[in-house]
Amino acid sequence: MEGVFQDQKTYEKMDPEQIVYTVQAWLPVPEGTPGGLFFGTTKLMPGKVGNEYFMTKGHFHTLSDRAEFYWGVQGKGMLILMDGERNTWAEEMCPGSLHYIPAHVAHRVANVGDSTLIFGACWPSDAGHDYTKIADYGFSARILEIDGKSVLIEE
Amino acid sequence: MEGVFQDQKTYEKMDPEQIVYTVQAWLPVPEGTPGGLFFGTTKLMPGKVGNEYFMTKGHFHTLSDRAEFYWGVQGKGMLILMDGERNTWAEEMCPGSLHYIPAHVAHRVANVGDSTLIFGACWPSDAGHDYTKIADYGFSARILEIDGKSVLIEE
């Protein structure tokens, strides 16, 4: 998770064994198959790096017009979305919430609660993951804890 | 649901207001959009027509290589699958079960329990529904109650 969080000094002091999130996925067809689907479950631990909540790395899809569904299963999260013009917005995730991630929109999730966040996902098997754009340029906003509240702050 | 069940005489005597199933779907992009996804929830009532459980009509996808996920939420069901060579098989559905419907495979669900069956679904927005092949030729097997058990019986 090097370079993901804003407060790199605090990040470097963290236990390197600390797990931020795990993903279980069912890939019933080979990656890249047109017309197929993949299904995953992500467990995102509660915690912060400085005042920034634990979150996933975030990605665009390699075939950038491929959409995805996320849905909340357990815990309290924020789905952070950014379009190709770097406009960033967020949606609250809770058990039963359903989120459509449209074509050409990068997505990451922050755990803003104090228990493990679990969410489901379904995406096309030919979507692919492009992590490089986010690794290089990040999102244009972050979810930070300010006065005990989770707030989307533009950089 | 005319013509769906084996025992048409019993079907004709049923209350015409009887609801067998309802579908709620979220279609965030126009039908036919490549790369998008749709999300649905189906409620399938408990009941039988003769010794055949209430079930959905069943369909292939119009773009027949498009896959789909179903997952059990509540109740007890059987997912009936048939490939292009009319080989038919079935998978048990229960809360938490996850089912991949591969390319070129028709699918329908029977409620084999005594409470409402609820299942979720996610499918590509350009898949489309082809009900005509099933309306004309049916599946090659049916789930019937025999001696109190649900059994897949070839026709």
Image (tube, coloured by chain):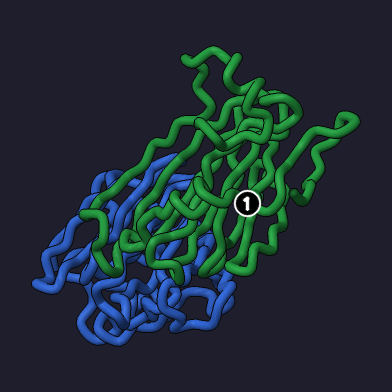
Chain colours: A green, B blue
In this rendering, the answer to whether B19 lies above or below A131 is below
Disc 1 element? loop
**Left or right: B38, with B80 as reference point:** right
Which of the two residues, B155 or A119, is positioned nearer the viewer here?
A119
Residue in view at x 39 percent, y 53 percent:
A129
Residue in view at x 42 percent, y 58 percent:
A123
| Percent x, y of residue B93 | 37, 47
In this rendering, the answer to whether A118 lies above or below A37 is above
In this rendering, the answer to whether B61 lies above or below B142 is below
Residue identified by numbered label 1:
A139
> Subunit of mark 1?
A
Quadrant of the rendered structure where residue B18 is? bottom right
| Percent x, y of residue B36 | 47, 71
Quadrant where the N terminus of chain B sits is bottom left
| Percent x, y of residue B11 | 40, 75
| Percent x, y of residue B101 | 29, 60
**Callout 1 amino acid:** Phe
Which of the two residues, A122 or B74, is positioned nearer the viewer here?
A122
Quadrant where the C terminus of chain B sits is bottom left
Asked whether residue A120 appears in the rendered view, the answer is yes
**Left or right: A15, with B140 as reference point:** right
**Left or right: A53, with A134 as reference point:** right
In this rendering, the answer to whether B93 lies above or below B49 is above
